[in-house]
Image: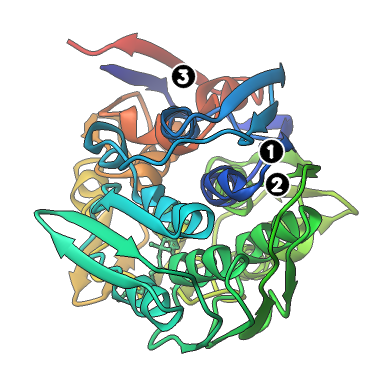
Amino acid sequence: MDKFVITGCNKLYGSVDISGAKNSAVAILPAALMVSGICRIENVPDIQDVRVIFELIKHFGAKIAKIDAHTYDIDSTNLTYDAAPYELACKLRASYYFIGALLGRFNKAEVPMPGGCNFGVRPIDQHIKGFKLLGADVDLNHGVISAHADSLKGGNVFLDMVSVGATINIMISATRAEGITVIENAAKEPHVVDVANFLNSMGANIRGAGTDVIKIKGVQELHSGTYSIIPDQIEAGTFMIAASCVGGDVVIKNIIPRHLEPITAKLLETGTEVEEFDDSIRVRRLSTLTSTNVKTLVYPGFPTDLQPLATTLLTIAEGNSKVTESVWENRFQYIDELRRMGADINVEGKTANIKGVEQLMGTHVEATDLRAGAALVIAGLMAKGVTEVHNIIYIDRGYESIESKFNGLGANIVRMTDN
Ligand code: EPU
């Protein structure tokens, strides 16, 4: 396993290119299994979760050809039905998208309960409710979800809570269901719209993605096509927050500024300067940070995936700040690590109360999940002295070459084998 050794306090200057969205890619690639033909997918991020998805896709007989560093042809013309293998499926949360995709292609699916980052109970009852309303029988036996339908039939699904995964998964399977499916209380995240746009470009008929009511008219077949994945909102937000945390002047390129509005708004409240262009954003921090409060919400609110990074930023903001998590049950494990670096944070239920300190201090810390890992990298960049971030396997799951991207801005991060 590797670790990052970070020498802190180098301000960040220059520009950084943002990769394709992880949470789109991990849904679009399984959905490509429903296409009897070749999907050319561009802007695929080079991250560990995508490598695992590729292994899973190959398991079902799809052929993958690499066209360039971020473009792949996926040929799903000849597939063989099989259960998803446990060793691969347990490695990531997004393996649940194989239930929707296999149901859409074969009217059946067997997929082990998904793995992924651990921040509390992560049920998938809403996905299952949706598949059942489309006419599938769904059982959970010995940790494996089995779904089967003679034929999928469109239906009305009202989600009990806004779930990105359930919205996308139901949308994927409903693409091939007979008749019309309506998903109400749907998630509106940019990657929900991205998956809908991908499916539509392959011949699906999905309307309303990006609003809370999505209508899907089932089609008999999906056809070959080319699609480019949107830029990663969370990676872009990570670099925006990093520029504010560490100070300097950074242009974040290949982004959609509208997706970043909740982050821009919070950075402005802290006294960070943010300037938006067509497909880039400039973040400068020239003075001391001011405290503020952050509450995570579904899109277009402040994304939960940037919550650990917001907390890290506010550790050095003058005064008292509050960060409230309202999407996940338990997403504060990293706070003990920030405390080890000198942060003054006290957690009360779902709120972290932060008293700004002048500076964080380098030490050994452990990534507890993907975004917590990114937060600790940024904490290391802010801290005096050397920080070692262990367990970076989590970070590699979702960030493409994070250390090269930061080093390109003047940071000092070395990847080393962790003994
Ligand atoms: N929920 C249920 N039942 C369900 C589904 C969700 O109770 O059937 C609850 C969850 O427990 C949670 C809330 O609803 O409290 C929202 O969960 P959601 O389904 O939206 O999350 P997800 O689809 O499993 C995706 C991202 C996460 C991100 C969340 C929220 C992927 C692969 N993962 O998860 O991303 O935090 O949406 O935006 O798309 C990350 O990238 O680091 C990450 C964890």
Residues packed near mark 2 inside 10 Å, few (<14), some (14 to 19) or many (20 plus): many
Cβ of disc 2 within 8 Å of ligand 1? no
Q: Is residue 289 left or right of residue 221?
A: left
Which quadrant would residue 81 be assigned to in this image?
A: top left
Disc 3 within 8 angstroms of ligand 1 (CB): no
The residue at 48%/70% (across/down) is: 151
Other residues around mark 3 within 10 Å, as few (<14) / some (14–19) / many (≥20)? many
Residue receiving disc 1: 18
Residue 274: horizontal and vertical position, in percent? 75, 57
Q: Which mark is residue 231?
A: 2
Apparent side of residue 366 relative to residue 79 in the rendered image (left or right): left
Please name the residue shown 29% across and 50% down the image: 111
Residue labelled 1 has its Cβ within 8 Å of some atom of ligand 1: no
Q: For the N terminus, give its image quadrant.
A: top left
For this orientation, the residue located farthest to the right is: 278
Residue flagged by tag 2: what amino acid is it? Pro
Helix, strand or loop under label 2: loop
Q: Disc 3 residue type?
A: Ile
| Sooner in the amino-acid sequence: mark 2 or mark 1 | 1
Q: Residue 43, position in %: x, y?
A: 72, 35
Q: Are marks 2 and 1 in contact (CB under 8 Å)?
A: yes
Q: Residue at x 30, y 33 (%)?
A: 88
Q: CA distance from mark 1 to mark 3?
A: 19 Å
Quadrant where the image shows the C terminus: top left
Q: Is residue 417 left or right of residue 179?
A: left
Q: Nearer the viewer, residue 165 or 203?
A: 203
| 338 and 44: which is toward the camera | 44
Q: CA distance from mark 2 to mark 1?
A: 6 Å
Q: Which residue is mark 3?
A: 413
